[in-house]
Amino acid sequence: MAKERGNYSTLTIISQQLNQQLEAERADRQQLQSELDRTLTELAKLKENPPPAIEQNPAPAIDLSDKAGKVANFLKTLLATDAKLIKDIKQAKDIRLPKGTISKIEEILGGGDG
């Protein structure tokens, strides 16, 4: 009989704890549902009245089409004279370009120090 009362007390405590957890979960779910409803309402308003696009002053496009060939030729020349560089590229290894490579490309493109 004492064992049954102990089991009953334990089950009662467990039941109370589970009910508290359930209520906490319900409250969390209700809060999440409220947040979801607010978010969906805001989204619907934004779809009806989208905010005006922010206009930025983009830099004017630079036409590099005439310089692409020069850069390509420079890189071909560079690769043709550097067997180690070609080997590293083929093996997908990290490569180190010879000094001045970036400066030369900037010079061709009309920027940098050149």
Image (tube, grey):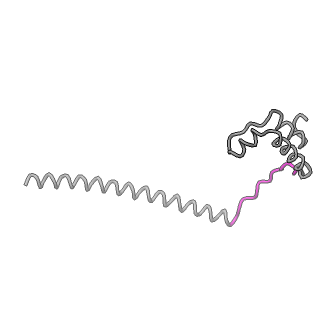
Residue 32's place in the image compared with 86, above or below, is: below
**Residue 89 found in image quarter:** top right
Counting labels gives 0
Residue 4's place in the image compared with 86, above or below, is: below
Q: Residue at x 83, y 50 (%)?
A: 58
Q: Residue at x 83, y 34 (%)?
A: 100
Q: Is residue 58 magenta?
A: yes
Q: Residue 54, percent across and down?
A: 77, 54
Depth check, front residue: 6 or 104: 104
Q: The N terminus is located in which quarter?
A: bottom left
Looking at the magenta stretch, what is its main secondary structure? loop
Q: The C terminus is located in which quarter?
A: top right
Q: Residue 72, percent across and down?
A: 85, 48
Lateral position of residue 30 relative to residue 106, left or right: left
Which residues are the magenta region? 48-61
Residue 108's place in the image compared with 3, above or below, is: above
Q: Residue 91, percent across and down?
A: 68, 45
Depth check, front residue: 19 or 96: 96
Lateral position of residue 110 relative to residue 18, left or right: right
Q: Residue 15, percent across and down?
A: 25, 56
Depth check, front residue: 113 or 93: 93
Q: Residue furthest left?
A: 1
